[in-house]
Image (spheres, grey):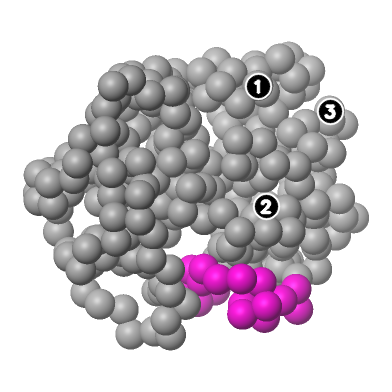
Amino acid sequence: MSMSPIIAAALALASAGSEIPKPQEIEEPVTAVEEPQAEPDIVIGATDYYERMTVPVTIGGEGPFRFMIDTGSQATVVTQGLQDKLGFELLGTATLVGMASRVPVEVVEVDGLQFASRTLDGIEAPILKARNVGADGILGLDSLQDMRVLIDFRADTIAVDDARALGGNKGFEIIVRARRKLGRLIITQAKIDGVTTSVIVDTGAQNSIGNLALQRRMRARDREEFVTTDVNGIDLTGNLALAKSLTIQGLELQNLTIAFADTPAFEALGLDRRPALILGMRDLRLFDRIAIDFQSRSILFDLPGGTQLQQLYNRTFFPSRL
Protein backbone atom coordinates (compact mmCIF):
# COMPACT_ATOMS: atom_id res chain seq x y z
CA MET A 1 0.00 0.00 0.00
CA SER A 2 1.34 3.41 -0.96
CA MET A 3 0.11 6.74 0.37
CA SER A 4 0.24 10.33 -0.88
CA PRO A 5 3.20 12.57 -0.02
CA ILE A 6 3.05 14.05 3.48
CA ILE A 7 4.59 17.30 4.66
CA ALA A 8 4.74 15.57 8.01
CA ALA A 9 7.35 17.64 9.75
CA ALA A 10 8.48 19.71 6.85
CA LEU A 11 9.29 22.80 8.85
CA ALA A 12 10.79 21.21 11.91
CA LEU A 13 14.39 21.13 13.14
CA ALA A 14 15.32 24.45 11.58
CA SER A 15 18.44 25.30 13.54
CA ALA A 16 20.72 27.90 12.02
CA GLY A 17 24.22 29.18 12.61
CA SER A 18 27.24 27.91 14.49
CA GLU A 19 26.10 29.67 17.67
CA ILE A 20 23.28 27.14 18.11
CA PRO A 21 24.47 24.05 20.05
CA LYS A 22 23.62 20.63 18.66
CA PRO A 23 21.23 18.56 20.78
CA GLN A 24 22.29 15.45 22.58
CA GLU A 25 21.35 12.31 20.72
CA ILE A 26 18.26 10.66 22.19
CA GLU A 27 18.23 6.90 22.65
CA GLU A 28 15.68 5.09 20.50
CA PRO A 29 13.98 3.39 23.48
CA VAL A 30 11.58 6.15 24.52
CA THR A 31 11.55 7.58 28.00
CA ALA A 32 8.38 8.57 29.79
CA VAL A 33 7.98 11.92 31.51
CA GLU A 34 6.39 12.64 34.86
CA GLU A 35 2.63 13.28 34.95
CA PRO A 36 1.93 17.03 34.88
CA GLN A 37 0.10 18.63 37.81
CA ALA A 38 -2.23 20.92 35.86
CA GLU A 39 -5.81 21.46 34.76
CA PRO A 40 -7.10 18.94 32.17
CA ASP A 41 -6.83 21.36 29.26
CA ILE A 42 -3.48 22.88 30.21
CA VAL A 43 -0.21 20.99 30.06
CA ILE A 44 3.12 22.18 31.40
CA GLY A 45 5.66 22.74 28.66
CA ALA A 46 9.21 21.36 28.80
CA THR A 47 11.82 23.10 26.64
CA ASP A 48 13.59 20.48 24.57
CA TYR A 49 17.01 20.67 22.96
CA TYR A 50 15.73 22.87 20.11
CA GLU A 51 14.00 25.35 22.45
CA ARG A 52 10.62 24.09 21.36
CA MET A 53 7.93 23.18 23.84
CA THR A 54 6.83 19.59 24.36
CA VAL A 55 3.79 18.15 26.12
CA PRO A 56 3.06 14.81 27.78
CA VAL A 57 1.01 12.42 25.63
CA THR A 58 -0.40 8.98 26.39
CA ILE A 59 -1.23 6.37 23.76
CA GLY A 60 -3.65 3.61 24.65
CA GLY A 61 -3.00 4.29 28.31
CA GLU A 62 0.77 3.94 27.90
CA GLY A 63 3.19 6.73 28.71
CA PRO A 64 3.28 9.63 29.12
CA PHE A 65 5.71 10.43 26.30
CA ARG A 66 7.22 13.77 25.18
CA PHE A 67 5.56 15.14 22.05
CA MET A 68 6.37 18.45 20.40
CA ILE A 69 3.48 20.65 19.26
CA ASP A 70 4.32 21.61 15.67
CA THR A 71 2.03 24.02 13.83
CA GLY A 72 4.18 23.56 10.72
CA SER A 73 3.70 19.80 10.50
CA GLN A 74 0.89 18.36 8.42
CA ALA A 75 0.81 15.06 10.30
CA THR A 76 1.30 13.71 13.78
CA VAL A 77 4.54 11.69 13.95
CA VAL A 78 5.75 8.84 16.14
CA THR A 79 9.30 7.61 16.58
CA GLN A 80 10.70 4.17 15.88
CA GLY A 81 11.12 3.69 19.62
CA LEU A 82 7.39 4.15 20.14
CA GLN A 83 6.66 1.71 17.33
CA ASP A 84 8.95 -0.87 18.94
CA LYS A 85 7.27 -0.37 22.30
CA LEU A 86 3.61 -0.15 21.27
CA GLY A 87 3.48 -2.10 18.00
CA PHE A 88 1.23 0.12 15.85
CA GLU A 89 -0.48 -1.36 12.79
CA LEU A 90 1.44 -0.67 9.59
CA LEU A 91 -0.67 1.07 6.93
CA GLY A 92 1.88 1.48 4.15
CA THR A 93 4.45 4.03 3.05
CA ALA A 94 4.46 7.70 2.17
CA THR A 95 6.96 10.32 1.04
CA LEU A 96 7.81 12.63 3.90
CA VAL A 97 8.90 16.11 2.82
CA GLY A 98 11.50 17.45 5.22
CA MET A 99 13.31 20.74 5.24
CA ALA A 100 16.16 19.26 3.23
CA SER A 101 14.77 16.08 1.70
CA ARG A 102 11.99 13.85 0.42
CA VAL A 103 12.23 10.39 1.99
CA PRO A 104 9.90 7.34 1.90
CA VAL A 105 8.75 6.42 5.41
CA GLU A 106 6.46 3.85 6.97
CA VAL A 107 3.04 5.04 8.17
CA VAL A 108 1.18 3.44 11.09
CA GLU A 109 -2.28 3.81 12.63
CA VAL A 110 -2.36 5.30 16.13
CA ASP A 111 -5.46 4.96 18.34
CA GLY A 112 -6.12 6.34 21.81
CA LEU A 113 -3.71 9.27 21.49
CA GLN A 114 -4.51 11.58 24.42
CA PHE A 115 -3.17 15.01 25.34
CA ALA A 116 -4.75 17.76 27.42
CA SER A 117 -8.51 17.00 27.26
CA ARG A 118 -8.51 15.42 23.80
CA THR A 119 -8.43 11.76 22.70
CA LEU A 120 -7.90 10.86 19.03
CA ASP A 121 -8.24 7.61 17.11
CA GLY A 122 -7.31 6.59 13.59
CA ILE A 123 -4.26 8.89 13.33
CA GLU A 124 -2.09 8.01 10.31
CA ALA A 125 1.39 8.76 11.60
CA PRO A 126 4.76 8.53 9.81
CA ILE A 127 7.59 6.85 11.74
CA LEU A 128 10.82 8.81 12.25
CA LYS A 129 13.98 8.30 14.29
CA ALA A 130 13.94 9.91 17.73
CA ARG A 131 17.40 11.43 17.27
CA ASN A 132 16.08 13.43 14.29
CA VAL A 133 12.88 14.54 16.03
CA GLY A 134 14.27 15.61 19.41
CA ALA A 135 11.24 14.12 21.22
CA ASP A 136 9.15 10.95 21.33
CA GLY A 137 6.79 12.30 18.70
CA ILE A 138 5.18 15.32 17.08
CA LEU A 139 1.61 16.58 17.43
CA GLY A 140 0.81 17.88 13.95
CA LEU A 141 -2.05 19.74 12.37
CA ASP A 142 -4.21 16.63 12.08
CA SER A 143 -4.38 16.63 15.90
CA LEU A 144 -4.81 20.39 16.32
CA GLN A 145 -7.56 21.38 13.87
CA ASP A 146 -10.54 23.38 15.24
CA MET A 147 -8.56 24.16 18.38
CA ARG A 148 -6.47 27.00 19.74
CA VAL A 149 -2.84 26.50 20.72
CA LEU A 150 -1.83 29.03 23.37
CA ILE A 151 1.86 29.33 24.25
CA ASP A 152 2.68 31.43 27.32
CA PHE A 153 6.41 32.06 27.26
CA ARG A 154 6.30 33.81 30.65
CA ALA A 155 4.85 30.78 32.42
CA ASP A 156 6.42 28.23 30.04
CA THR A 157 3.07 26.53 29.42
CA ILE A 158 1.06 25.33 26.46
CA ALA A 159 -2.74 25.24 26.55
CA VAL A 160 -4.85 23.45 23.94
CA ASP A 161 -8.61 24.03 23.86
CA ASP A 162 -11.24 26.20 22.18
CA ALA A 163 -10.77 29.97 22.30
CA ARG A 164 -13.50 30.59 24.89
CA ALA A 165 -12.07 28.05 27.32
CA LEU A 166 -8.68 29.77 27.03
CA GLY A 167 -9.99 33.24 27.87
CA GLY A 168 -10.90 34.49 24.42
CA ASN A 169 -8.91 37.35 22.95
CA LYS A 170 -8.40 39.26 26.19
CA GLY A 171 -4.86 40.59 26.63
CA PHE A 172 -3.77 40.22 23.00
CA GLU A 173 -2.78 43.52 21.39
CA ILE A 174 -2.39 42.20 17.84
CA ILE A 175 -4.84 39.84 16.11
CA VAL A 176 -3.99 38.80 12.55
CA ARG A 177 -6.28 36.92 10.19
CA ALA A 178 -4.60 34.17 8.21
CA ARG A 179 -5.32 31.97 5.19
CA ARG A 180 -5.51 28.21 5.57
CA LYS A 181 -3.44 26.01 3.24
CA LEU A 182 -2.87 22.28 3.79
CA GLY A 183 -3.99 22.85 7.37
CA ARG A 184 -1.49 25.61 8.06
CA LEU A 185 -2.32 29.21 8.84
CA ILE A 186 -0.43 31.54 6.50
CA ILE A 187 -0.21 35.31 7.01
CA THR A 188 -0.25 36.74 3.50
CA GLN A 189 0.24 40.47 4.02
CA ALA A 190 3.43 40.66 6.04
CA LYS A 191 6.32 42.82 4.82
CA ILE A 192 10.04 42.20 5.27
CA ASP A 193 12.12 45.27 4.41
CA GLY A 194 9.16 46.41 2.29
CA VAL A 195 8.75 43.08 0.45
CA THR A 196 5.27 41.52 0.73
CA THR A 197 5.85 38.06 2.21
CA SER A 198 3.79 35.04 3.22
CA VAL A 199 4.57 34.06 6.82
CA ILE A 200 4.00 30.71 8.52
CA VAL A 201 4.06 30.76 12.32
CA ASP A 202 5.84 27.48 13.05
CA THR A 203 6.24 26.21 16.61
CA GLY A 204 8.32 23.31 15.29
CA ALA A 205 11.07 25.44 13.77
CA GLN A 206 13.79 26.79 16.02
CA ASN A 207 14.80 29.72 13.84
CA SER A 208 13.25 31.71 11.02
CA ILE A 209 13.88 30.47 7.47
CA GLY A 210 13.22 32.33 4.23
CA ASN A 211 13.00 31.01 0.70
CA LEU A 212 15.24 32.11 -2.15
CA ALA A 213 12.50 34.24 -3.70
CA LEU A 214 12.48 36.37 -0.55
CA GLN A 215 16.26 36.57 -0.51
CA ARG A 216 16.33 37.82 -4.12
CA ARG A 217 13.61 40.41 -3.55
CA MET A 218 15.32 41.68 -0.39
CA ARG A 219 18.72 41.64 -2.10
CA ALA A 220 19.90 40.26 1.21
CA ARG A 221 23.63 40.15 1.83
CA ASP A 222 24.95 36.86 3.20
CA ARG A 223 26.57 37.01 6.65
CA GLU A 224 27.67 33.42 7.13
CA GLU A 225 26.73 29.87 6.20
CA PHE A 226 24.53 27.66 8.34
CA VAL A 227 23.96 23.91 8.44
CA THR A 228 20.87 22.21 9.84
CA THR A 229 19.59 18.64 9.93
CA ASP A 230 15.98 17.93 9.06
CA VAL A 231 13.63 15.31 10.50
CA ASN A 232 14.85 12.78 7.95
CA GLY A 233 18.43 13.21 9.17
CA ILE A 234 19.54 15.03 6.00
CA ASP A 235 21.70 18.16 6.19
CA LEU A 236 20.58 21.45 4.69
CA THR A 237 22.98 24.32 4.02
CA GLY A 238 22.24 27.95 3.35
CA ASN A 239 23.17 31.50 4.31
CA LEU A 240 22.23 33.84 7.13
CA ALA A 241 21.23 37.44 6.40
CA LEU A 242 19.81 40.33 8.39
CA ALA A 243 16.40 41.91 7.75
CA LYS A 244 15.92 45.41 9.16
CA SER A 245 12.24 44.86 9.91
CA LEU A 246 9.34 42.43 9.72
CA THR A 247 5.92 44.05 9.89
CA ILE A 248 2.65 42.17 10.38
CA GLN A 249 -0.41 44.39 10.59
CA GLY A 250 0.34 46.63 13.60
CA LEU A 251 3.41 44.67 14.69
CA GLU A 252 7.09 45.20 13.94
CA LEU A 253 10.19 43.11 14.63
CA GLN A 254 13.52 44.81 14.00
CA ASN A 255 16.93 43.31 13.14
CA LEU A 256 15.65 39.84 12.30
CA THR A 257 18.22 37.17 11.38
CA ILE A 258 16.88 34.92 8.60
CA ALA A 259 18.35 31.66 7.35
CA PHE A 260 17.86 31.46 3.58
CA ALA A 261 17.83 28.07 1.86
CA ASP A 262 16.40 26.24 -1.13
CA THR A 263 14.20 23.62 0.54
CA PRO A 264 11.51 21.24 -0.77
CA ALA A 265 9.24 22.34 2.08
CA PHE A 266 8.38 25.65 0.40
CA GLU A 267 7.77 23.90 -2.91
CA ALA A 268 5.43 21.38 -1.26
CA LEU A 269 3.38 24.28 0.11
CA GLY A 270 3.34 26.10 -3.22
CA LEU A 271 5.41 28.92 -1.73
CA ASP A 272 8.68 28.52 -3.61
CA ARG A 273 8.07 31.12 -6.35
CA ARG A 274 7.03 34.08 -4.20
CA PRO A 275 8.60 35.46 -0.98
CA ALA A 276 7.84 33.33 2.06
CA LEU A 277 9.14 33.02 5.62
CA ILE A 278 8.87 30.42 8.35
CA LEU A 279 8.73 32.34 11.64
CA GLY A 280 10.40 30.11 14.22
CA MET A 281 10.42 29.80 17.99
CA ARG A 282 13.48 31.95 18.72
CA ASP A 283 11.64 34.95 17.33
CA LEU A 284 8.23 33.95 18.71
CA ARG A 285 9.78 33.90 22.18
CA LEU A 286 10.13 37.65 21.97
CA PHE A 287 6.44 37.85 22.84
CA ASP A 288 4.81 37.18 26.20
CA ARG A 289 2.21 34.94 24.58
CA ILE A 290 1.06 33.79 21.17
CA ALA A 291 -2.11 31.95 20.19
CA ILE A 292 -2.69 30.05 16.96
CA ASP A 293 -6.45 29.65 16.53
CA PHE A 294 -7.30 27.19 13.76
CA GLN A 295 -11.05 27.58 14.15
CA SER A 296 -11.10 31.35 13.57
CA ARG A 297 -8.03 31.28 11.29
CA SER A 298 -6.27 33.91 13.35
CA ILE A 299 -2.95 34.38 15.11
CA LEU A 300 -2.78 36.50 18.25
CA PHE A 301 0.24 38.24 19.77
CA ASP A 302 0.69 39.53 23.33
CA LEU A 303 3.50 42.09 23.36
CA PRO A 304 5.96 42.17 26.27
CA GLY A 305 5.55 44.89 28.84
CA GLY A 306 9.17 46.02 28.63
CA THR A 307 11.11 47.30 25.68
CA GLN A 308 14.54 45.71 25.48
CA LEU A 309 14.45 41.92 25.27
CA GLN A 310 16.91 39.06 25.49
CA GLN A 311 19.70 38.99 22.94
CA LEU A 312 19.29 36.46 20.17
CA TYR A 313 21.74 35.82 17.36
CA ASN A 314 23.97 38.36 19.16
CA ARG A 315 21.36 41.01 18.32
CA THR A 316 18.74 42.80 20.41
CA PHE A 317 15.18 42.69 19.11
CA PHE A 318 12.40 45.18 19.80
CA PRO A 319 8.87 44.01 18.97
CA SER A 320 6.48 46.93 19.05
CA ARG A 321 3.32 48.43 17.61
CA LEU A 322 3.72 50.58 14.53
172 left or right of 82 in image: right
The answer for how far apart the CA atoms under marks 1 and 2 are is: 30 Å
What is the three-letter code of the residue carrying label 2? Phe
Image quadrant holding the C terminus, namely bottom right
Q: Name the residue under label 3.
A: 195
Magenta-colored stretch includes residue 170: yes
Residue 270, label in figure: 1
Q: Is residue 243 above or below residue 223?
A: below
Tag 3 secondary structure: strand
> Is label 1 in a helix, a strand or a loop?
loop
**Looking at the magenta stretch, what is its main secondary structure?**
loop
Q: Which residue is drawn at 35% across and 49% down?
A: 122
User: Residue 152, image x and y in percent?
Assistant: 55, 70
Name the amino acid type tagged 1.
Answer: Gly
Task: Please name the residue shown 38% across and 66% down the image.
Answer: 119
Residue 216, percent from left and from top: 73, 14
Q: Is residue 79 magenta?
A: no
Residue 228, located in which quarter of the rendered image? Answer: top left
Image disc number at residue 129:
none
> Image point 70% across, 42% down: which residue?
180
Q: Is residue 279 visible?
A: no
Name the residue beneath numbered marker 2. Answer: 317
Q: Magenta stretch?
A: 154-171
Q: Closer to us: mark 2 or mark 3? A: 3
Tally of marks: 3
**What residue type is disc 3 on?**
Val
Tell me, yes or no, if residue 99 can be seen here. yes
Report whether 296 appears left or right of 12: right
C-alpha span from label 2 to label 3: 20 Å
